[in-house]
Amino acid sequence: MTPKDPTLGLAEFQEDIVGAYLKGRGDELPADEALSRSIIPAATASIRDFSHIAPEIPMLIPDKCVGCMACVTECPDTAILAKVVTAHTLQDKLQTVEDPQKRSPLEKQYFKTTKYFTAYEKRKLEPGFFNITVDPTKCKGCGECVVACGENEALKMVQKNDVILKEAQRNYDFYQKLPPTSKTFIQEKILPDMMLCEESLLFKGGAGNCMGCGETTAIRMMLAATGFVYGKENIGLVAATGCNTVYGSTYPFNPYQVPWTNSLFENACADAMGIRARWNQMGWQDKKIWVIGGDGAMLDIGFQSLSRMLTSGMDIKVIVLDTQAYSNTGGQASTASFLAQNAKMSSIGKRLHGKTERRKELANIAMMHPDIFVAQTTATLSNHFYKCILGANEYKGPALVNVYTPCPPEHGISDDAGGKQAKLAVYTRAFPLFIYDPRAGQTMKERLSLRGNPAATQDWYTDPQTKEAIDFIAFARTEGRFLKQFDPQANPSETLKRSQEDRLTNWRLLQELAGL
């Protein structure tokens, strides 16, 4: 029977409710107080299995891995996990494997790297063996990890079969039996290492996001940085309706390990203000509350609510998942869409030439509110992203972090291209990086930093090999949403040229404000 307790214990929920859904019998559950409130316990999505949806899965090549953590950081689905263990711990656990023939293949998955073994040996410390494990039930086969690995070539996509899946599951099961990575191997100054810490893995796999989703990477990295410093018991989320609430609460699957609530498009920030006020009354001033929302929630219908919150002085943080379209409802144009972008409601045809309005720069507008920490970043440039999140959390007051989050189906890019395209967006001034910190000084020049942008004093970044300027039109050539802005000879349209002028105007404004 379904439990009467509306708080729903995890074990009961998984047995009675998740079990019924997994068997395709969710509609047979009786009406119940607990179900009517739509309360979902933490991390129920961890038992969801996606191993059947993609033909390929990443495979590790241990002797090429350097332990950079790029694949772990950029995986949208928490399907790639890392751990460092000592030789003693590894051998003890290997002895618990009943079949001796299976011990050697498992042992080979834990290997020496300069970062965690050689460097520790030189310092007369006990070294560690590094491991990358793929959870086959969470991997959706986007291949973004392989792209993130880059020239190291320590990962490759392989065709799934029964043998490959059983081996991957065996590796993952053994990984789970090992203790958490010791804090001695987690170097706080190397920010990607945060995901070695159990407290950082607060967004579990099993969410219903698309393959290669840029939003989930940003969310799990934000939670990793916040959890690493403050602990999961000190975090709460208010999620504005959008893609993030759909893949984050496809009943009965919840990927979050922290409490969160869903509000409407237009009032998530107002909702957060009420929660913040109540927390402060209870003496919970140190708890962190983050508002999550996309284009509609923050730039359009919820813009007034956001602006009001930013002027409140309340200690509330906002992460904007900027996909430049209404991804959840089919890719309609938003005020975040680029001029010349082909999107629903701003399509390209004989009379219409894509979006004709200039893009609204939310982060620029946020800077004009008094004493707000503002950052613009992308998850693929992980050090900059983490610094933005850590800075926002440290700031005593409102903070907004606007994140470029690639949406493969709406941007017209492949599932593995999100990170590459986000980086290109930065390099072509489509989406400049910056941090605006009121603590840095009294003037705009002191407060605004454009560090992280290549050739920050120039109009365009120049490719060091080809010596060609990498401009916004070069970016547009790589994405399907701008395809119709080029003629058969690949010449850009006048509308796209105006979009490039708009991007350069925005970049020059930031340069001027930063004193460059």
Image: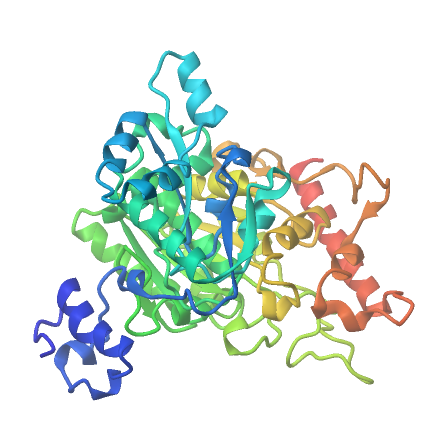
Relative vertical location of residue 489 with respect to residue 217 in this rendering, above or below: below
Which of these two is toward me, 168 or 397?
Answer: 168
Q: Total marks drawn?
A: 0
The colour mode here is rainbow
Q: Quadrant of the N terminus?
A: bottom left
Residue 143 appears anywhere in the view: yes
Location of residue 362 in the rendering, given as x and y in whole percent from the top left corner: 57, 58
Which of these two is toward me, 68 or 288?
Answer: 68
Q: Residue at x 23, y 48 (%)?
A: 233
Residue 411 horizontal side relative to residue 296, left or right:
right
Residue 442 appears anywhere in the view: no
Location of residue 190 in the rendering, given as x and y in whole percent from the top left corner: 46, 31
Q: Quadrant of the C terminus?
A: top right
Which of these two is toward me, 389 or 73?
Answer: 73
Relative vertical location of residue 430 with respect to residue 63 in this rendering, above or below: below
Q: Residue at x 65, y 81 (%)?
A: 345
Relative vertical location of residue 354 with respect to residue 415 in this rendering, above or below: below
Relative vertical location of residue 335 with respect to residue 33 in this rendering, above or below: above
**Quadrant hosting residue 456:** top right
Q: Residue at x 47, y 68 (%)?
A: 297
Location of residue 493 in the rendering, given as x and y in whole percent from the top left corner: 85, 69
Residue 438 horizontal side relative to residue 85, left or right:
right
**Quadrant hosting residue 347:** bottom right
Location of residue 13 in the rendering, given as x and y in whole percent from the top left corner: 17, 69
Residue 23 horizontal side relative to residue 144, left or right:
left
